[in-house]
Amino acid sequence: MKLSKLMTRIGTESAFEMLAKAKALEAKGKSIVHLEIGEPDFDTPKNIREAGKKAIDQGWTHYCPAAGIKDARAAVAEYLSKTRSIKVSPEEIVLAPGAKPVIVFTILALAEPGDEVIVPNPTYPIYESATYFAGAKLVPLALREENGFDLDLGELEKVLSSKTKVLVLNSPANPTGGVVAEATFEKLAKMLRKYPDVTVLSDEIYSRLVYEGTHHSISQFPGMRERTVIVDGMSKTYAMTGWRLGYAAAPKELVAAMEKLAINTYSCTASMVQMAGIEALTGTQADVDKMVAEFRRRREVIIQGLTSIPGVTCRMPKAAFYAFPNVKALGVPKVKELADFILYEAGVSCLPGTSFGCFGEGYLRFSYANSVENINEAVRRIKEALPRLKGKVPASKG
């Protein structure tokens, strides 16, 4: 079977590839500590589960409008209006089976061959994959540790042009756990006035998992609401990864385009899941508060553990549930080889920074969406294995 050339332009998410490697080792009897997948290890809150069950019993098991059920769109609009201090109408909302579809739909609807999409690097790999799939040109924007993994507006201004159609922002960020500072957003909003054709794709899926300060959205700043696509969803905040429910707030003409793309791909998002989503947004947030408090505790544990390893340094992440340690001092030229060594020799599954772009070289990503006991065990195993690194993995000649 000969696949189309289009398939050569689409990428993947290597977290699932590493998970498959780890599962294969487990099947052979090896003990693995999983710190690769960005998935909360908590159960979906009971009130949300009960709402989903009730929705099934009430007959929410049929097709619904492609953009989402009216009440669900209204709940999302009200939630975004409240949490971002902006005005969002239900007609500006699209619900989807996860946040990925609305990310891909935004880029497909706005960018074509000859256009440019500016994407932070390192960052979530689906932005890059969707850009290539659309046939547009990817323009990477380096996120540097010495800048706290914030945007460098000087570098951004150098790559902005009349060809730029989409600027991707991810704050709070995967994989760095960094956030864009309020002052940076303010300056960025002023800068973008010179580029009226640029639409901002603002992925805010970790908006509720902020440990220092408060969440800010580019949509809150003058002139940005009408040219920003806000992406968010239920997976991270409400431990609903398997439910598949994400959403976007976008200008109405883009909502219409996303609706058409939805009809051509998945028809609609599961009705009973949308009803559970209403409960997630409007019901008690007590379980969310508990999860955030626990993630904050784990953040302290994993950073203390990683920085106790000789040759490893790590900034304290401000949000999300990822640690992004600098491992350059270990002398391994390709961080992918180091990640494989840690998996096979230490039984700890993590991701190489290059899974998130070329500027991730020299870093690893650990998800601390796991218990304190497992985090401590992972650190212990890595410490024990690293003396065996010499001879197992090529050392840097530099």
Image: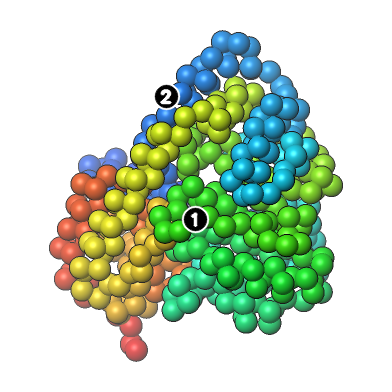
Q: What is the C-alpha distance between the residues marked 2 and 1?
A: 27 Å
Task: Look at label 2 and name its amino acid.
Answer: Lys
Q: Which residue is mark 1?
A: 214
Quarter of the image for residue 129 reads bottom right
Q: Which residue is mark 2?
A: 46
Say if mark 2 contacts mark 1, CB within 8 Å: no
7 with respect to 311 (left or right):
right
Task: Look at label 1 and name its amino acid.
Answer: Thr
Q: Residue 102: in sight, yes or no? A: no
The residue positioned 73% from the left and 27% from the top of the image is 70
* Residue 139 coordinates in the image, percent (x, y): 66, 72
The residue positioned 57% from the left and 42% from the top of the image is 233
What kind of element bears circle 1? loop
225 with respect to 297 (left or right):
right
Residue 394 versus residue 215 in the image, above or below: below
What kind of element bears circle 2? helix
The residue positioned 29% from the left and 40% from the top of the image is 27
